[in-house]
Amino acid sequence: MRGVSPVTLSRPLREGVEATLSSRGAGSVEILGAEPVSGGCIHQTARLSTNLQENFFLKWAVEPVSDVFAAEADGLNALREGTDLTVPEVIGHSGAGENPAWLVLEYVPRGSPAPDYAERLGGALAALHEPSEGPYGWHRSNYIGSLPQTNRAMGDWPAFWWAERLEPQLALAHDQGRLPGLDHEWGALESRLPTLLAGAVNDGCALLHGDLWSGNVYPGSDGGPVLVDPAVYRGHSEVDLAMTELFGGFPTAFYTAYKKRRPLTDGYEDGRRHLYQLYPLLVHVNLFGGAYVKGTEATLRRALRSG
């Protein structure tokens, strides 16, 4: 990577990663170089070259973290089992309490999108969203960005969306003095959620990426889609779709392919989409501040009018 300064890895970080790579049965592995890669906005990232024939992707935390990388590894493994799309293989991660915390993945280089890139992504996402039996939630808590995301198993979708998604973010926004909208508006939304989400409750429960914006999918070297940085759980399939529409970056062909395999039920375009977009908007309010407050308030009021 011409013109890019190499990354200096601390001794504990280097030794931990080398031990994990060596334990794969490849013999003694030595990191020969680390070059920064773009895309990480929370943690440090680098491409590792080693004395093996393959490169690896390393992500590590500058500040102490708890189980954020164990949670990410769990989500990536779930996606690898659930989709034919490329999802980087988890090589290993640091143990509990280890500092610095780190995660090593298969390195999937970025390429140019194939002509059918958008169609492949839309069709594969629809396939991932095939409903299955079981409760909403996940077997563990994880993270959305750097914020904790609880996933308590529940059989009631409106109750889950309020208790496990909107309410924790509202409480955090309130504590930070950033609460968008009025208390009575959020109270009205809570009481009306069973009605507003009535059209979704019979669609079943699907595995979700959970944080599907354009920065978390990219074309690999073969031109096909690569999924990264999930916040997985089992929920309503429209949640991922609403996230793709919030910040843009997904072409019309993606939605056409998705809807061909999984047609949307009535009420998504004018109602449920706004309800589902409230969650990432609140996350952005809590992570990045006041710039997202007005947009969140507008989406809240659109959601209330939809009923």
Image (cartoon, rainbow, N blue to C red):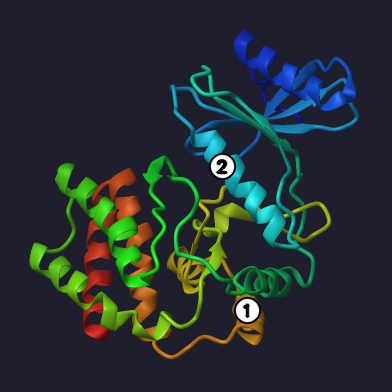
Which is more toward the observer, 194 or 283? Answer: 194
Residue 202 % position (x, y):
45, 83
Kindly identify the residue that appears in the image at 64 percent across and 68 percent down: 128
User: Going by the image, does 119 lie left or right of 248?
Assistant: right
The answer to which quarter of the image holds residue 73 is top right
Residue 108 % position (x, y):
76, 44
Disc 1 + disc 2, Cβ < 8 Å = no
Residue 144 % position (x, y):
43, 48
Q: Residues within 10 Å of mark 1 (few under 14, many from 20)?
A: many
User: Going by the image, does 125 lie left or right of 120?
Assistant: left
* 238 w.r.t. 29: above or below: below
Kindly identify the residue that appears in the image at 77 percent across and 61 percent down: 224
Three-letter amino acid code at the position of disc 1? Tyr
Which is more toward the observer, 194 or 60? Answer: 194
Q: Which residue is mark 2?
A: 72
Kindly identify the residue that appears in the image at 28 percent across and 78 percent down: 194
Three-letter amino acid code at the position of disc 2? Glu
* 92 w.r.t. 283: above or below: above
Tell which residue pokes out farthest to the bottom in this image: 266
In the rendered image, the quadrant that contains the N terminus is: top right
Kindly identify the residue that appears in the image at 91 percent across and 30 percent down: 53
Q: Cα distance, mark 1 to mark 2? A: 25 Å
- Front tag of 1 and 2: 2
Lower sequence index among marks 1 and 2: 2
- Give the secondary structure at mark 1: helix
Q: Is residue 39 in view?
A: no
The answer to which quarter of the image holds residue 72 is top right
Which is more toward the observer, 44 or 11? Answer: 11
Q: Which residue is mark 1?
A: 258
